[in-house]
Image (cartoon, coloured by chain):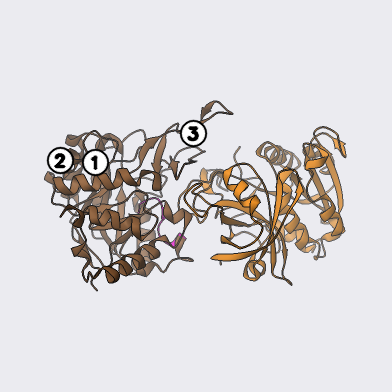
Chain colours: A brown, B orange
Amino acid sequence: MNTTVNLGGIMMKNPVTTASGTFGFGFEYQPYVDLQRLGAITVKGTTPAPRAGNSTPRIAETPAGMLNAIGLQNPGVDRVALEIMPKLAELGVPVIINIAGDTVDDYALVARKLDGVTGVAGLEINISCPNVKKGGIQFGSEPRSAAEVTRAVKAATGLPVIVKLSPNVTDIAAMAEAVAEAGADALSMINTLVGMVIDIDRKKPLLANITGGLSGPAIRPVAVRSVWQVYRAVKLPILGMGGIMNARDALEFILAGATAVAVGTANFVNPRATIEVIEGIEDYMRQNGFDNIDQLVGLAHK
Amino acid sequence: MSQLIQVEIAGNSSPAPNIYVLELFAPTLAANAKPGQFLHIRCAEGTDPLLRRPVSIHAVNRGTGSVRIMFQVVGQGTEMLARRQDGLLDVIGPLGRGFTWGQGHPSHTNTGSAAVDGSTTNPGGIIVVGGGIGAAPLFFLLQELAVTSAAPRVKVLLGARSADQLLTVELAATLGFKVQIATDDGSAGFHGLVTDLLAEELRQKTAHVYACGPAPMLKAVCTLLGQAKVPGEVSLEERMACGVGACLSCVCRVREPGGEENYQRACVDGPVFSAAEVVW
């Protein structure tokens, strides 16, 4: 059985990675997960300088989901490149680094610093974080600025570049077309949906950031629809995510057109979710007579 | 090392209104757990509520392999947990850095071990202060302190809103500790706050203070310790998702030895922090 996929130049032995921000730098899950079984590890959003992140409360639980407003807390690109990557590279698993910044130059700077760092297999441009005042979603809600960031990052690195799209737009296919034209090697979708919870006892927004990003199974149908639409609009490989809890969920994304999938919020609930998704996809292929994962990608369109 | 395991529920009791104690048969947890650590528990089979609930370890019996957790019902997750009588419970644990009992935290003040081993002359008292459900993890600490040479120096102060909400008072007494109590409404013990009792106790030579309870109480404890120049540790709480240090949800503001402030994760850097480093 062949489960190998090529995500825009990132070769993965199976189609399963982790969603940025839900898996730390991987080591946090080492007691529960054989990290070497993962197709890739996608790590926390990384910015030029260290960031403290938002005030607390940073999360709120919602029906079949959660809101988060972490605010890109991270140790900065230099520590990621010099201290974290050498250890992570020893695993021999492709590492995808999510990159973010306040300005186009910030994105390019982070991309340049990660170019050639051992173990880094690709970059995921975060133009869809809803929880920071500058950067993030401001680039991801308008096709022209999304294309500009993509071009700048492509010019700064030889690594494969994935652009992570926001669902908080009128036309996600138009965004996909714009970044595809700007040179993106792959697309990932979806980032979280902007949401909010009011604490009726305090009579105030529950999150310190007021709004947060909704993730978890509650958003899965929106994510599957986004993958379906973008698969029809552009030729690029898609990394699908949004509420994947198990292999059945992952298969929905693959059949809708995702070449690979990312497990996010499910890691918090079941630390072994990634491994169960990998095994469940293999079982499905065996039971349904598929010997190559490629046969499943976008099959629901045919 | 922490594990993701299914453990058997051996019993469920309710020592006070809205408070439950689940007894778990979990020999590996019992063998590895340290006071102040917690279990991250999946309360629902499905996706609502979605997240696990962190619950502190209340008591351990290494001989029988029993671990008890004590919690207050505050929402959907804990309500589901309170209904469990038997079967298997999906837990991750033991998690977090507990009280510095027997060995110091690498980055925390190391006075805990000095306080407990009793190696100095007139080392001073060890005060354990709990408020409300905060008493839950302190009982496990008392179980461990009871078998050290420091046991005669331990004083226990427990507070609650009213007499019926006082927790672990008899349990602490069965370990041989002298327990002072305070209630907000005066229905038992001292009429006032447990931190008033602490202020009085701190007039005597004190080596170390351990505290767990609601945030306003812990803030007052930190202030009192700062004034008295007594080292201590407080167990903090913050909304948590992963429990293993990945998601950065449960952060607490902490002052580094150099004076710089940053966020540390309650789940792996805590939940127990040195009283001097917490920024309120």
Amino acid type assigned to the residue bearing label 2 in the image? Ala
Q: Is residue A271 left or right of residue B55?
A: left
Cα distance in 3D space between marks 3 and 2? 34 Å
- Single out the residue that lies furthest toward the front: A288
Do the residues bearing badges 1 and 2 touch, measured as CB atoms within 8 Å? no
Viewer-nearest residue: A73 or A165: A165
Query: Could you say which disc has been placed on residue A105 in the image?
Result: 1
Give the mark, 3 or 2, whose residue is nearer the N terminus: 2
First-in-chain label (1 vs 2)? 1
| In this picture, residue A224 sits left or right of residue B137 | left
Q: Are marks 3 and 1 on the same chain?
A: yes
List x then y, in percent, for residue A93. 32, 67
Q: Are marks 1 and 2 on the same chain?
A: yes
Q: Which residue is mark 2?
A: A178
**Is residue A140 something one can see in this rendering?**
yes
Relative height, residue B141 to residue A1 (above, below): above
Q: Quadrant of residue A144?
A: top left
- Residue type, label 1: Asp
